[in-house]
Image (spheres, grey):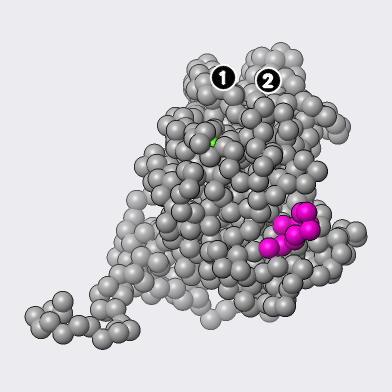
Amino acid sequence: MSSTGTNQPAPECAPLPIQAHSARLQRLFEQEAEFRKETIYFLVVDRFCNGNTDNDGIGKKGLYDPSHSQWGHYWGGDLEGIIARADYLRDLGITAVWLSPLFEQVDDIEHGYGPMHGYWTKDFKRVNPHFVRLGEATSLHACETLRRMIDTLHERGLKIVLDIVCNHSSPELNGSKGVVTDDGAPLANFHYDCNHFYHHYPPITDWEDEFQLLRHEMLGLATFNEGNIDFRNYIKSAIMAWLDLGFDALRIDTLKHMPVWFWQEFVTDIQAHQPSTFLFGEYGFGSPWDPRCVRYANDTGISILDFGLSGAIRSAFSGQEPGGFHRIETVLAMDPVYRRSTELVTFIENHDMPRFLSICPCRADLELATVLLLTLRGVPCLFYGTEQYLACDTCGGDDPYNRPMMASWDLGTRMANLIRRLADLRRSNRALSYGRHNQNYVSEDLYAYTRSYRDNRVVVIVNKGGDTCVDIGSIDLAEGQHRCLLTDRLLAVTQGSLRGLEVPAKGAFVLAVEGAPLRATTVVKFQINGYVTHPGETMAVSGDVPELGGWDPGRAPHLEYINGDAWFAEVGFAASAGKPIRFRFVVLRPGDEPVRENLICRTFLLPASGSVKLDLDWDRLA
Ligand SMILES: [Ca+2]
Ligand SMILES: [Ca+2]
């Protein structure tokens, strides 16, 4: 009804009332894609928990294996299993759940392998019927079980990560390949591809060849033609429909097999639709030494899974490569190549590699590796069952034997307690989410480092060798006793050192000091890359409002050094909230003139409240 009191219907396509319109704009504007305080838990839906046995045998005969001995078959896990274990996930302390793909799959199997993993999609707008109630509608917005799972996890404060594949659909299975439907309506078929939805090249043979990487088939999977705008519109509209249901983040499969321009367009449209969507992708076995991998991490708007650090931690413990903890040091020294090293998603095991216990069978080593995972830079991602020491060593534990059925739900394991304590610390202590990494001590067997941001500190000491006694210097904590969060032991800091510190075999200490949180009407997270500072120099953000020092570099808020290429800080705004600001970055040099960015100053409209990120590059002097 109109506000004038007349009963005339509003004309079709009427614009939103101005207030509603600006409220929506404001809400979009105030959202940010921030995942650095989260601890992710990745679970394979079919292998996590069977919450409904009615759906177990559906679909093609022979797809389901009740004996759990045929690893390429469905074993019964489903969304009601996740609902049943939602309290367990919350009580474990993790804050986000990455679910293996939920899309409807081709219902087929050949040579003992079907699509239980979820990477052979048939319909990007429907839910896999193996995961919901028998006979239930599987269209996204009609699927009641999906709705209930999302609500159940959100009610427990858990974010949900949707796993997506945009590169391909399904392989040749019993004479059929790449059949895709659009909420049930025929859309594409590799063998009858009159709309050119697919590339038609042979499998990749040369993994160094850019053309092959992008257009040829990975393992015979029907590979989408991203040059076709109809394909792009289909895949983007499908993912947006999932986000509308409440998914908080996207994990993207096979990132390296689609061009950077595709991802840039994809991220632009996804974040225009839902700006708070954090995106991270799989650049399989990438590393900071691979320029193509770094380009994807820096230029797509999508963070990547950090295979470099994963390999270093795994080999430090397994000894498969020499060097021990020096291997971690070597990888972290490369951090300046990444624009957003603190947003890399880190892990020590996943569904494509043997579990940690299969390459390093000592549980205490798994616990120490988890301490590193939860305290080194990046957003940590645990694999389901790590907290229960789950592993199967058949054939070295490699895929598919790395995906056993979850067998126990004990929140009292040493590992579960460790995860809970450190995930809680990640939520509150910004040294872990945003801070730099200072190495205090490294040997093959002992690693000590400090994460720091503003007045937050976390000191970590990990010893994978035998009993030892060390002096660890450059400890930036107050003089006196500090209680270890893992062992409750008191450690004494004297003159900036931990002297004569006795570290037991396979032992770890974590000391933490928490600063005051930043409270302000509007918070801007300034990040600047691309200026290599020298010792003694400090980066600041200088601008035309009081909060930025009114163009006086001496009063400009300082940023925090993150690594040799990146500076970062949250800056609070009160009086200027909701107003435009003009600013530029300056480098403060002791005893010398500040260096100012060489540009007509940057302009930004501050939101009236909330928190936003500005991820910027130093404007180089001509
Ligand atoms: Ca089931
Ligand atoms: Ca491709």
- Name the residue type under label 2: Arg
Reply yes or no: does residue 177 show up in magenta.
yes
Q: Quadrant of residue 463?
A: top right
Asked if the residues shown at circle 2 and circle 1 are in contact, with their CB atoms under 8 angstroms apart, the answer is yes
- Give above or below for 33 relative to 422: below
Identify the main secondary structure in magenta.
loop
Check disc 2: other Cα within 10 Å, few if <14, some if 14-19, many if 20+.
some
Image-based side of 114 in relation to 248, left or right: right
Question: Mark 2 highlights which residue?
Answer: 363
Residue 581 visible to the viewer: yes
Looking at marks 2 and 1 on the same chain, the residue that comes earlier in the sequence is marked by: 2
Q: Is residue 389 a member of the stretch shown in magenta?
A: no
Could you give the CA–CA distance between mark 2 and mark 1, rounded to whole angstroms? 10 Å
- What residue range appears in magenta? 170-179
The residue lying toward the viewer, choosing from 580 and 205, is 205
Secondary structure, mark 1, is helix
Q: Residue at x 77, y 25 (%)?
A: 393
Residue 434: image location, x then y, percent: 54, 48
Residue at figure coordinates x 83%, y 29% from the top left: 395
Q: Which mark is residue 319?
A: none
Q: Residue furthest front?
A: 61
Measured from the top left, where is residue 561 in percent x and y?
59, 52
- Name the residue: 53% across, 64% down: 183
Q: Residue 530 in the image: state x and y as whole percent.
A: 66, 64
Viewer-side residue, 447 vs 415: 415
Where is residue 450? Give x, y as percent: 60, 36
| Disc 1 residue crowd, few under 14, some 14–19, many 20+, Cα 10 Å | some
Q: Specify whether residue 464 is in view.
A: no
The three-letter amino acid code for the residue at tag 1 is: Arg
Q: Which residue is mark 1?
A: 414
Q: How many marks?
A: 2
